[in-house]
Image: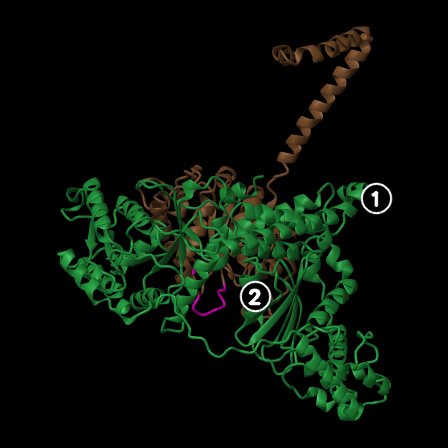
Chain colours: A green, B brown
């Protein structure tokens, strides 16, 4: 039932492979996809991966640098696969220990691994063990608990009969503790142990007198109004009678229909504006004179806040206690000291327990450096998987090995997975006589327009003509801001130097229009006028705002820009993950084609405001897998840089 | 000792220790003092020698197999070393093995196969570049047209690297996958690469600086003012064709005769 199973070295040579009967396609493609998207992107915390119709599970052997991969159809749920891989790994290692231990690839190349028979035997064992546990047979009615309940007890009646219900159940379970003294005990005495009385009806247990007695008790109870002994050890709270439906009150609905009439305020707003083009901004929902007087505080319930604080403190104390209790057994023994020395000299293989304290410390360190929390934990899991079973050399401590591996992974994540050379791509587009379109998207206030101006300065310094498309038709002053930048850039590079033609032009259609339409017209204009680059500025939008995200996705799907850049600020913390995931999701959902345009690159802005808390770079590249194309380090035109992966990782790992 | 005298606060506690030390030294035999000095000198000399040897472990005795992902490096590695065909996957780490060249001297050096994936490439090149006496740059001739810009960028990055331009290892560009009918010839690949490197010289030098202001490599390839040609480079560059898979597929021999000859001439 397996489609294939391969064993290959980390250097790329396939040592042994098995292809299931009837499987004709080569497995090289799926396995390569697994390597590229999981292992190389440091997502190996979770050990399964799905590619088209196949589901792939893998295991890394870090001591001998091997990878074991098994593939099977996604629709099958095979329960024995995990254990099977482990068995195969152990078996293979034991059998070919000699060849594998030799350093250098010659041994791997020259030896022939005849593993088929062992593999078939292991597979047979695994399949049989999964079949051995047959389907669990259902319990017969007699054996179930339900048969032991009395029918009468299961009939729900209102009020105090719950007591009787409890009693009825307890009747049959002799193992439960003796309840408080009550008249119900009488019937218990009558009924013998539960095991024998399985088909007894509740009615038979209660004689006529006892029923009368019980009802008398109830009557007295209700008269007195005092709670008598609770009928059972787990008193069911008597439900309050529902009072009947209450009228629901909406918070924003107001109390009368007069409040919901907004026609007056809208009319006032239109007259007061006077300018054409600006009245489109008057929100129909905005109420004039609602901001009179002091500003209201942000509303939150203070009592809840206090409760939460108390809970947090408790949680912190509990965590602290747990930590100290964990530390104590490690510190105490003298054997611990000796073990540390032993760990320094001689080769020992790393296990999960050895790495755990170091990894926890590294995870906290990363989080302190502003890496998103879930990214930090995924990274640490992946590093643990990569190092498990690895043999350390002499004089290397666990901490140094783990730190080295983490550093390598971080550099690997920050390295771009494709070529990043904007100027070369612009030249290519120019040779094809079409403009190179770059779109900037992001949430509010991250620096899209500022960095757009910086990038256009860089491009015109290198001799390209730029058209800026003002597709931010919502924010007041967005078009004027871009016009100011255009004027400044043109004064820095006057048209006289470039053949009498202004090197930067602005394409705008005012406020309130459809952004996608403006972008399309701008690109057509650029093609006609032979501009080299079109920079499209969009309005900032929160990732949760569905209509705005739909509008952005439409702009990108319709215009098919060459580069979609997500602008994110370096100050963002855990929010980065949410922003990027939702942006990518929106772009994928609303695109019509089967190859949707997703975010192609990241612009990391406000880099000068963080000292060495550079974790946002890691979060963003890890989530999208796309490179950081530009880094903004200030507000003047010269403050544009490219990313140096080593420097960022150095700043991250610095104590 | 002077530092202690400067720190006024520390003068009093340190003074008695200094006196005691001085008295002890004076009391000792002069031979003992000479012995101390000699042992210190030995330690210092051994330290210096150790550093010298450790740093010169980068004796250039390795030939690197580099190239883009899926260009056929690992299969070429296997063919060169053992002549066998092996199925391969994307390499995650490097592989190295001693190789016996097919020349009269029978010299042997290390052949190292580096992973070609974009996120691993820079790290491994960084690790091994100083040990390289020759670089075999493997190119996938069949899909070269689509990848020409990526190939050229990697080659540019290699050639402008400070360690490479200092050691000047010889460069062999192996145009692999010649068994596919659409494969481009070595001459064509050379011309295309020269054109591309010409453009890259301009765009790369205009690229943005990094955010920490570290200096970019200022090696200028070829001659200023003239179009770039591989003959202008200080190192020996050779273009040749080969096919790791071989015309008969898995069971036959690989067509790597010219490659083996070039390797023998190193």
Residue B266 visible somewhere in the drawing: no
State whether residue A590 is above or below residue A328: below
Kindly indicate whether the residue at mark 1 contacts the one at mark 2 (C-beta within 8 angstroms): no
Q: Quadrant of the N terminus of chain B?
A: top right
Q: Which one is in front in this view, the residue at disc 2 or the one at disc 1?
A: 1
Residue A308 percent across, percent down from the top left: 56, 54
Q: Bin the neighbour count of mark 2 within 10 Å (Cα to Cα): few under 14, some 14-19, many 20 and up.
A: many
State whether residue A620 is above or below residue A204: above
Who is closer to the viewer here, B262 or A590? A590
The chain carrying label 1 is: A
Q: Secondary structure at mark 1?
A: helix
Who is closer to the viewer here, A527 or A19? A527
Residue A270 occupies which quadrant of the picture?
bottom left
Residue A565 occupies which quadrant of the picture?
bottom left
Residue B173 percent across, percent down from the top left: 48, 53
The chain carrying label 2 is: A
Q: Is residue B183 magenta?
A: yes
Residue at label 2? Answer: A34
Residue at label 1? Answer: A335
């Amino acid at each position: 039932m397996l489609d294939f199973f391969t064993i290959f070295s980390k250097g790329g040579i396939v040592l042994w492979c098995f292809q299931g009967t009837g499987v004709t396609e080569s497995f090289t493609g799926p396995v390569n996809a697994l390597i590229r998207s999981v292992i190389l992107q440091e997502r190996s915390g979770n050990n399964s991966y799905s590619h088209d119709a196949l589901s792939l599970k893998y295991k890394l052997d870090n001591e001998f640098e091997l990878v074991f991969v098994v593939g099977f159809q996604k629709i099958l749920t095979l329960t024995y696969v995990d254990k099977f891989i482990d068995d195969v790994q152990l078996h293979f290692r034991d059998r070919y220990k000699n060849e594998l231990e030799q350093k250098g690839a010659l041994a791997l190349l020259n030896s022939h691994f005849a593993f088929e028979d062992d593999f078939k035997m292991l597979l047979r064992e695994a399949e049989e063990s999964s079949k051995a546990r047959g389907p669990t047979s259902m319990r017969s009615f007699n054996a179930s608990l339900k048969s032991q309940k009395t029918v009468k007890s299961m009939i729900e009646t209102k009020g105090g009969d719950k007591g009787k219900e409890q009693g009825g159940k307890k009747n049959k379970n002799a193992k439960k503790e003796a309840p408080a003294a009550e008249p119900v005990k009488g019937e218990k005495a009558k009924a013998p142990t539960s095991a024998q009385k399985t088909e007894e009806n509740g009615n038979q247990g209660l004689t006529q007198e006892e029923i009368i007695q019980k009802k008398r008790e109830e009557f007295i109870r209700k008269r007195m109004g005092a709670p008598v002994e609770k009928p059972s050890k787990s008193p069911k709270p008597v439900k309050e009678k529902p009072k009947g439906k209450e009228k629901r009150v909406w918070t924003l609905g107001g109390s009368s229909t007069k409040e919901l009439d907004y026609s007056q305020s809208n009319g006032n707003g239109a007259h007061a504006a006077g300018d054409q083009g600006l009245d489109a901004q008057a929100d129909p929902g905005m109420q004039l004179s609602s901001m009179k007087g002091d500003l209201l505080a942000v509303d939150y319930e203070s009592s809840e806040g206090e409760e939460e604080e108390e809970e947090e403190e408790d949680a912190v104390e509990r965590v602290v206690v747990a930590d100290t209790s964990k530390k104590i057994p490690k510190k105490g023994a003298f054997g611990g000291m000796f073990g540390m020395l032993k760990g320094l000299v001689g080769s020992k293989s790393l296990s999960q327990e050895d790495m755990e304290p170091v990894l926890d410390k590294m995870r906290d360190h990363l989080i302190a450096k502003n890496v998103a929390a879930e990214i930090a934990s995924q990274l640490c899991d992946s590093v643990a998987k990569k190092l498990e079973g690895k043999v350390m050399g002499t004089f290397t401590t666990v901490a140094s090995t783990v730190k080295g591996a983490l550093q390598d992974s971080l550099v690997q994540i920050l390295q771009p997975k494709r070529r990043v050379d904007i100027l070369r791509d612009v030249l290519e587009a120019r040779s094809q006589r079409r403009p190179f379109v770059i779109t900037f998207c992001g949430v509010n206030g991250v620096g899209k327009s500022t960095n757009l101006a910086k990038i256009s300065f860089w491009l015109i310094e290198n001799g390209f003509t730029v058209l800026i498309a003002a597709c931010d038709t919502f924010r007041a002053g967005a078009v004027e801001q871009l016009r100011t930048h255009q004027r400044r850039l043109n004064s820095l590079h006057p048209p006289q130097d470039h053949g009498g033609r202004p090197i930067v032009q602005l394409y705008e259609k005012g406020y309130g229009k459809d952004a996608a339409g403006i972008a399309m017209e701008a690109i057509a204009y650029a093609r006609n006028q032979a501009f080299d680059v079109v920079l499209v500025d969009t309005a900032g939008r929160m990732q949760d705002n569905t209509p705005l995200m739909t509008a952005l996705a439409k702009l990108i799907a319709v215009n098919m820009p060459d580069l979609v850049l997500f602008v994110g600020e370096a100050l963002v913390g855990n929010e980065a993950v949410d922003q990027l995931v939702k942006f990518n999701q929106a772009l994928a959902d609303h695109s019509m084609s089967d190859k949707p345009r997703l975010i192609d690159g990241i612009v990391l802005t406000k880099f000068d405001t963080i000292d060495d808390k550079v974790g946002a770079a890691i979060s963003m590249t890890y989530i999208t897998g796309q490179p950081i194309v530009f880094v903004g380090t200030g507000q003047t035109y010269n403050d544009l840089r490219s990313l140096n992966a080593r420097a960022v990782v150095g700043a991250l790992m610095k104590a | 000792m002077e530092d202690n005298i400067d720190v006024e606060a520390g003068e009093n506690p340190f003074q008695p220790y200094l006196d005691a030390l001085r008295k002890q030294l004076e009391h000792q035999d002069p031979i003992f003092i000479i012995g101390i000095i000699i042992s210190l000198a030995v330690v210092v000399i051994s330290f210096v020698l150790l550093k010298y040897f450790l740093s010169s472990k980068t004796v250039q005795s390795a030939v690197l197999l580099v190239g883009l992902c899926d260009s056929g490096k690992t299969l070429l590695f296997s063919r060169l070393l053992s002549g066998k065909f092996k199925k391969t996957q994307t390499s995650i780490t490097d592989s190295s093995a001693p190789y016996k060249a097919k020349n009269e001297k029978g010299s042997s050096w290390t052949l190292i196969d580096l992973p070609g994936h974009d996120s691993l490439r820079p790290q491994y090149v960084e690790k091994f570049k100083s040990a390289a006496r020759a670089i075999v740059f493997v190119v996938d001739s069949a899909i070269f047209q689509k990848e020409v810009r990526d190939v050229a960028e990697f080659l540019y990055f290699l050639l402008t690297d400070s360690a490479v331009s200092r050691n000047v290892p010889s460069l062999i560009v192996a145009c692999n996958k010649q068994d596919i009918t659409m494969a481009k010839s070595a001459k064509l690949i050379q011309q295309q690469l020269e054109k591309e490197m010409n453009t890259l010289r301009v765009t790369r030098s205009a690229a943005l600086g990094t955010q920490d202001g570290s200096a970019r490599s200022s090696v200028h390839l070829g001659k200023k003012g003239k179009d770039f040609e591989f003959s202008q480079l200080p190192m020996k560059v050779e273009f040749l064709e080969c096919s790791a898979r071989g015309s008969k597929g898995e069971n036959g021999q690989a067509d790597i005769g010219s490659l083996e000859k070039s390797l023998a001439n190193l």
